[in-house]
Image: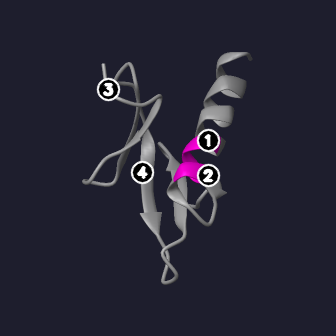
Amino acid sequence: MLRYRINLLEDGSVVSDDGEYLGIWDTDENDHPSFYPDGHAEALLFDVSIPALCWRIEEWLDARASK
């Protein structure tokens, strides 16, 4: 188990607390982070801070699980 529900790793990976690989993350020229789900070439989510992006990824993960 990882420390947080959504983990942004140093290698650019985004992983859930149970080890599920979700995609990658990166920052733009203003250090705003973006999330690219696995298999997507364009960012699905972006925000002005890492904690805010993690919260949005968590919402996305919950919505995906409820389908």
The disc, 3 or 1, on the residue closer to the chain's N-terminal end is 3
Q: Residue at x 68, y 34 (%)?
A: 59
Element type where label 2 sits in the image: helix
- Is residue 51 positioned above or below 15 on the image? below
For discs 3 and 4, the disc positioned in front in the rendered view:
3
Q: Which mark is residue 52?
A: 2
Residue 15 appears in which quarter of the rendering? top left
Residue at 47%, 28% in the rendered image: 5
In three-dimensional space, the C-alpha distance between marks 2 and 3, rounded to whole angstroms, equals 19 Å
Over which residues does the magenta segment extend?
51-55
Label 3 sits on residue: 2
Q: Which of marks 3 and 4 is nearer the N terminus?
A: 3
- Label 1 – label 4 distance at C-alpha: 15 Å
Earlier along the polypeptide chain: callout 2 or callout 3?
Answer: 3
| The label number, if any, that marks residue 24 in the structure image | 4
Contact, mark 1 vs mark 2 (Cβ under 8 Å): yes
Q: Are marks 2 and 3 in contact (CB under 8 Å)?
A: no
38 sits to left or right of 57: left
Residue at the bottom extreme?
A: 29
> What is the quadrant of residue 21 in the picture?
top left
Q: Reply yes or no: does residue 52 show up in magenta.
A: yes
Residue in view at x 42 percent, y 51 percent: 24
49 vs 22, nearest the viewer: 49
Judging from the image, what secondary structure is the residue with disc 1 in? helix
Tag nearer the camera, 2 or 4 = 2
Could you say where residue 42 lies in the image, as x and y percent from the top left?
58, 61
Between the residue at mark 3 and the residue at mark 1, the CA separation in whole angstroms equals 16 Å
Q: What x and y, as percent, mark residue 63? A: 72, 26
Q: Which amino acid does label 3 sit on?
A: Leu
Q: Is residue 20 left or right of residue 44?
A: left
